[in-house]
Amino acid sequence: NLRSMTLSATYFDLDYKGRVVQPINPPSQALSGNPMFEPFVVRNPTAAQQADVFSKADFFDNYSSGPYDPSQVVAIVYDTYQNATSQKLNGMDMAYRQTFQLPKSSLNAFLNATWLHLDQSTVATLPNVRLSGTILNAPDLKVRGGMSWQKGGFSSTAVVNYISDEIDDGVIPSVPIASWTTVDATVAYRFGGQSGFSQNLKVVVSASNLFDKQPPRAVSPAILYPGMYFDSANSSIIGRFVSLTVTKG
């Protein structure tokens, strides 16, 4: 039924000035010598420079194996929020939705996708750098689509989520991060009782990441957080999560 089909596409092109960002991303590359990060790094800081940092801090944690020694400090990294020189974002949002009438039931199909490019510069003398598609940043492509079937008080929905592959530029050389596809499912039943306990009663069983798909492996997060081998901005280690919801009223 073409009359029930809805298609939409929205192109966007945004040019931000002075947007607030953290200038060093990924943080594991703060001391890599990247000229984009160097303005925010003080190498071989003096004891006075270190003391100035401590005076502005709420607390101090020493993760080294020995007592704090100012002469052993290699660098101070200022990764506090800054105004970016430039941030440009462009891409497209696409959506599809359609209803199919079946004998005594209905089927709804839907698809939403976002494709984007994100470029940023934190130093006026350097060109923009592509951030989208790199670890801890928005992916180049994100898709969510599925179908929902309904017959009387019974309904079921299956959804596929897709995040495109990325680049882990938190290590040298950079390494790829595989794409991630997961499936969510929901089964629900609304009782049709006109009175008594079953009136306005609905039972829903939902499963997120139905097939318990592990997030794709990433290397650089574990440099700062041991054991964290995944992109926490775009994936999760929770795995399959099943819930039962009963509502009445």
Image (tube, rainbow, N blue to C red):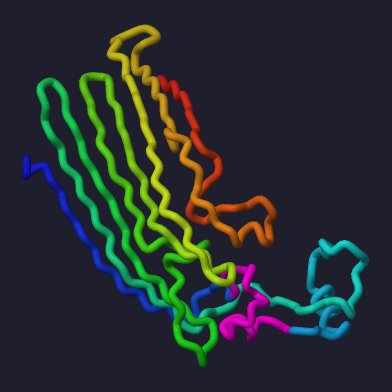
Q: For residue 51, what is the image quadrant?
A: bottom right
Q: Residue furthest bottom?
A: 125
Q: Residue furthest top?
A: 196
Q: Who is closer to the viewer here, 238 or 180? A: 180
Residue 164 in the figure: left or right of residue 147: right
Q: Who is closer to the viewer here, 26 or 8? A: 26
Per the image, is 181 magenta? no
Whether 130 is drawn above or below 249: the answer is below
Q: Who is closer to the viewer here, 115 or 219? A: 219
Residue 231 in the figure: left or right of residue 65: left
Whether 175 is drawn above or below 146: the answer is below
Name the spot of residue 132 as percent of width and height, x first.
Answer: 43, 68
Name the quadrant of the N terminus.
Answer: top left
The magenta-colored residue range is 24-42
Name the spot of residue 4 as percent of width and height, x first.
Answer: 11, 42
Whether 75 is drawn above or below 136: the answer is below
Name the spot of residue 235 as percent of width and height, x first.
Answer: 49, 50
Q: For residue 118, what is the image quadrant?
A: bottom left
Residue shown at 83% from the left, 65% from the top: 60
Residue shown at 41% from the left, 20% from the top: 248
Name the spot of residue 136 as percent of width and height, x first.
Answer: 52, 62
Per the image, is 40 magenta? yes
Q: Who is closer to the viewer here, 166 or 199? A: 166
Residue shown at 34% from the left, 23% from the top: 188
Name the quadrant of the C terminus.
Answer: top left
